[in-house]
Amino acid sequence: MVTDILLQSLPNYVPFIDGDKRISFTQFQNDIKSYCFALQKIESSSAILYIPDNIYLFYVCFMALLYADKDIILPGYLTDSMIPDVLKLSPVLITDEKFSNASKDLIDPTTIITNETADLKPIQNGYISFFTSGSTNAPKIITKTFESLMLEIQIHSEMQQSVIKKSPIVLATVMPNHMYGMLWRFLFPLYNQLTQDLDTIFYPEEIQAKQKLYHYISLITTPTFMNEIVAYDSQYHFSKNCLAIYSSGSLLSQATSEKMYHLFNVSPFEIFGSTETGGVAYRQQISSQEFCVFPTVKIEQNVDKTIKINSSFSYKSPYDMQDLIEPTSNNTFKLLGRNDRIVKIAENKVSLSEMESKLSQNSLVKESYCLSIPKGNNMVLGALICLNGQGNSLLKKNGKLYLVQALKKYLSAWYSKNVLPKKIRFVYQIPKNTQGKILKKEIESIIHSPCSEPIIENLIYEKNKLQADLTFLKDNIYFKGHFPDFPILPGVIQLHTIFYFLEHFFHETPQNYSIQKLKFTNLILPDTTIQFQLEKVEQDKYNFHLNHENKPCASGIVAIGGKDV
């Protein structure tokens, strides 16, 4: 059975590399047996598993829970404020993170020490609940069986034999607690006896470093990560030892696909699907823009031109997706966007995906996201726009109003005046999760916020530290009236900026906090570029500094869990 991958004897197989340490298949089996012995004592039939940083421990606990006959719930990420709702799904939370309001049933897997082991028997049920990506206002929980995941892995493995035979080391920029990461980062290498480097890749420079260590690599990544690579492609020189690049989460642009081929000498293998359906189709743009349906998957076109799939990978079959397609031949099709992204504005039907495509062709725009927003009794369009370097330079030189008018004039070549975006926000990045899926709630929060974010440049983000150059434009509303004859950046906006970075990069949205050692030492004037730094120094403490030309402007500590000030 394909589900019994851990019942084999593979004494020479090394599934994981952890820094300088090589973890054998035998050790992995033994660790699973020990944890299975401990976890099968849980009275609950299910458990929430959240181990975001220790990937090996996550894998051990994941397999141990399956062999202990426990259903697994995999949240994308957790914060203190999310704990009460998540614990409604199961009373048991297995995590190595410290949460202040978790239940007494919290189990810290780092404290499990036992000399006893369980006998591993074939996985009987293996129900795994994934959270959908959150591209709508209410992410769903989709439950799959372990067997359905392994059946999909079998199909992918048969198609990737030419890569598998060369035994590349698997690198990944994605986490294994969602569908794509679970399939391709964890189960695909394990099933095919490939070795995975356990370090999660956050920066292109890390790929360069890993390429020097290994004869061949393959890369599990997303369009979001590849867009960041090609945005600064002149800075990188990658070895030509990458055998495959696998991508999922959102569509990869043709320009990015072509640049990735130029950089790595391999065309990204794009997987179209969803948490609900699993993989549906694939393409490599060096060969074709069309998607080819995976073997064993059957598709139909509905009356409204959306796609219906029949698949053993899907949590229910048949399943109607909201993606519009144009069949091109037997088992191939073009993706035309999503049916739920066609909106009516001023009695005109507008494809949001098409408008985003038009914007992406503008020489100033890197990426955009359009949405409909209520205004009185009507709906109007809003747009979040990420500018490239040329666009940011023009924005700093001429201001927001100039650029808004320029982009509206550009769009007017295709759209009438009454459907053009009425609200445009320039942002550093479109909010997405680790799979590259749009986070609609965060986008709506940005579009409705009265505070525009500063121009963010030269951002460097590591696990616990972030630094960037910030420019607060003079035509931002928060300079008006503060003060009329001598505008300066209000302290409250400086703190708002700090919490923006806490939320979008450190996933912190504290309800209770205190600001300690707060100092405002120099004024920040309009159109001034500030050097910003935010660093996690303790579990619930973040230091921040805002400097201008080596002179401190503001500094302090955000302590989460204290009293508001």
Image: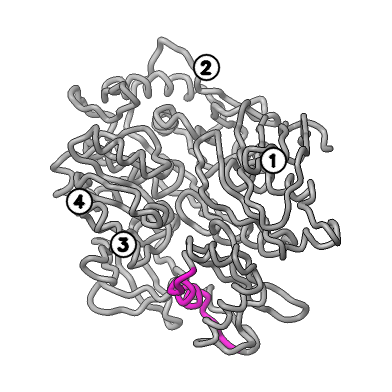
Q: Which residue is outermost to the top?
A: 115
Q: Mark 2 points at which residue?
A: 111
Q: Which residue is drawn at 66% across and 25% down?
A: 104
User: Circle 3 sits on which residue?
Assistant: 257
Could you give the CA–CA distance between mark 4 and mark 1, rounded to whole angstroms?
A: 42 Å
State the residue in front, 50 or 307: 50
Quadrant that contains the N terminus = top left
Residue at numbered disc 1 = 81
Rendered view: 418 above or below 281: below
Is residue 104 rendered magenta in the image? Answer: no
Residue range of the region highlighted in magenta in the rendering? 348-364
Distance in Å between CA atoms under marks 4 and 2? 39 Å
- Residue 512 in view (yes/no): no
Q: Does the magenta stretch include residue 349?
A: yes
Pinpoint residue 55: horizontal percent, then vertical percent: 42, 32
Q: Distance between the residues labelled 1 and 3?
A: 39 Å
Q: Is residue 305 left or right of residue 468?
A: left
Disc 4 is placed on an element classified as loop
Of pointers 4 and 2, the one earlier in the residue sequence: 2
